Image (tube, rainbow, N blue to C red):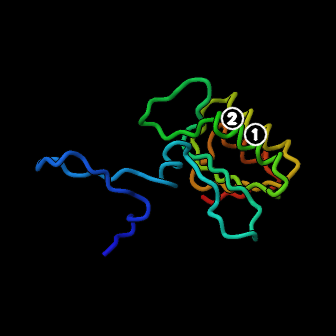
Amino acid sequence: MQNEHSSKYRLEEGPNEPDKTPELKPSGIVEKIQQLGQTNVPDTGQDTNIHCLTIIGQIEGHMQLPPQNKTTKYEHIIPQLVAIEQNPKIEGLLVILNTVGGDVEAGLAISEMISTLSKPSVSIVLGGGHSIGVPIAVSCSYSYVDY
């Protein structure tokens, strides 16, 4: 019987030693989430033209934060915003925010990029929208907060 994680994880076989148990390694979409902290909205067909951008944890800018911190790196966000602007198939942006803030310059760069998009944008603040998260949230065409 398959469990719910069977499609998200693959079994990594190690040497055949009795004390070594195989470990689960992420694959596919889980790996993208671990590397970039986000993924595109799942493909639901030709009906959707909205890009989903998640900003979760501290916004990491020029200073690298310790690995135990949950962060969103601005060098991952900026290229996505450029791609959204240049892609004619994308008609809008949904920004999901849950942040305690972070690097001010990086946050201002993100909010400036969002505010200058030629496409409509909506921000949803779920949980925290503190510090530099506020300018990012209000840089969208519409902002919603759920506390």
Q: Looking at the picture, tell me which residue is in the foreground, 14 or 8.
A: 14
Relative vertical location of residue 99 with respect to residue 144 in this rendering, above or below? above
Indicate left or right for 100 with 83 as reference. left
Is disc 2 placed on a helix, strand or loop?
Answer: helix
- Residue drawn at x 38%, y 65% is 6
- The Cα–Cα distance between marks 1 and 2, rounded to whole angstroms, is 6 Å
| Residue 93 location (% of width, % of height) | 76, 54
- Residue drawn at x 13%, y 47% is 17
Residue flagged by tag 2: what amino acid is it?
A: Gly
Task: List the residue tagged with mark 1.
Answer: 111
- Residue drawn at x 20%, y 45% is 15
Q: Looking at the picture, tell me which residue is in the foreground, 109 or 131.
A: 109
| Residue 19 location (% of width, % of height) | 12, 47
| Residue 60 location (% of width, % of height) | 58, 32
Indicate left or right for 35 with 77 as reference. left
Indicate left or right for 6 with 131 as reference. left
Task: List the residue tagged with mark 2.
Answer: 107
Which residue reaches farthest right?
118
Q: Looking at the picture, tell me which residue is in the foreground, 6 or 102.
A: 6
Which residue reaches farthest top?
63
Marks 2 and 1: in contact by CB < 8 Å? yes
